[in-house]
Amino acid sequence: MAIWVLRYGHRRLRDARASTHVALVARALGAAGIIFQGEKDDGLMERLRKITKEWGGKFEVKYTEEWMKDVQEFKTNGGWVAHLTMYGEGLPAAIVEARKRKGNGLVIVGSQKVPIEAYQMADFNISVTNQPHSEIAALALFLDHYFQGKELGLEFVGAQRRITPSKMGKNVVSCDEKGQV
């Protein structure tokens, strides 16, 4: 089962950094891809594709104008939808139920105010806390809880570069065409 992220309401000038971080967290923590809705930002999408090519793995980057149609199509194809909001049900209980679902998951992460239709279409409206918080942190916590920490050991096949863990300093190594150091 794959998890996708729908970044609702992206605004090129206001949200470029936060939307980039939403996508980077999604990619690093095991999502299959991200779908942007809002202002089309070809530069952002191309940078994310370049990062995936350089750092390996499979991560798709798409754009949609009709997010409700895409959500409905996702559900029609057997998937389930989670909307991350501070007004939702608690993360621990919702994750248990989400993991029981068959099919792929779509996680809606808002940039601007999300319309009521997102709440209505979601199978789960999930809150990591009922306090104001970052949508980036909420996505990271959702993915970590959903994958039960297994995403932390993901292998990103085909990487051109890898980071070698170290207590101090930056150790970035180049990889061969097979992604090996």
Image (cartoon, grey):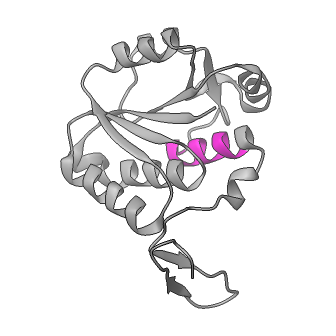
What residue lies at 48% left-to-right and 51% top-to-bottom?
A: 58
Residue found at the very far front of the displayed protein: 178
Q: Where 18 sits versus 3, above or below?
A: below
Q: Where 167 sits versus 154, above or below?
A: below
Say whether residue 179 is magenta.
Answer: no
The N terminus, quarter of image = top right
Quadrant of the rendered structure where residue 9 is?
Answer: top left
What residue lies at 21% left-to-right and 36% top-to-bottom?
A: 39
Q: Which residues are magenta?
A: 134-144
Q: Nearer the viewer, residue 8 or 104?
A: 104
Q: Where 179 sits versus 5, above or below?
A: below
Say whether residue 142 is magenta.
Answer: yes
Residue 123 percent location from the top left of the image: 60, 14
Quadrant of the rendered structure where residue 115 is?
Answer: top left
Residue 60 percent location from the top left of the image: 40, 44
The number of discs equals: 0
What residue lies at 78% left-to-right and 32% top-to-bottom?
A: 92
Q: Is residue 153 left or right of residue 63?
A: right
